Amino acid sequence: MEKKLPVMKDWSDQRIARFWESHSVAEFIDELEEVTDVKFVPPKTAVAIRLEAADLEEVKEIAKEMGIGHTVLIRMWIKEKLKRAKLA
């Protein structure tokens, strides 16, 4: 009897792990699809910077107006500055 692979979209990592501890991929071989476009995303490294409280609040306000997180905005600004420095 062929088993149907459950939809795990809303499952926690722990629930997925428990499922695969008691099942084999071979049970669902007919449902598997070949992945041809694999993209490697390099990991990010955390860095601590010291900002004046007023500067951080200003960054947070700008980020909020843009609808993004303040750390995302800071990363964007760093990337922009690095790009300009390369062109100089």
Image (spheres, helix red, strand yellow):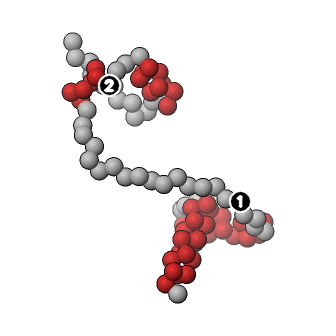
Quadrant hosting residue 55: bottom right
Residue 20 placement, left or right of 48: left
Determine whether 26 is above or below 52 in the image.
Answer: above
Q: Residue at x 44, y 27 (%)?
A: 16
Q: Which residue is mark 2?
A: 25
Depth check: give the residue in front, 56 or 25.
25
Determine whether 2 is above or below 75 in the image.
Answer: above
Depth check: give the residue in front, 5 or 67.
5
Tell which residue pokes out farthest to the bottom in this image: 88
Q: CA distance from mark 2 to mark 1?
A: 42 Å
Amino acid type, label 1: Ala
Determine whether 31 is above or below 70 in the image.
Answer: above
The reply to whether dot 2 and dot 1 touch (C-beta < 8 Å) is no
Quadrant hosting residue 48: bottom right
Residue 76 placement, left or right of 58: left
Determine whether 18 is above or below 60 in the image.
Answer: above
Q: Residue at x 37, y 19 (%)?
A: 23
Q: Position of residue 79 (x, y in %)?
A: 54, 71
Q: Residue at x 57, y 77 (%)?
A: 81
Q: Position of residue 58 (x, y in %)?
A: 69, 70
Q: Position of residue 52 (x, y in %)?
A: 78, 68
Residue 2 placement, left or right of 48: left
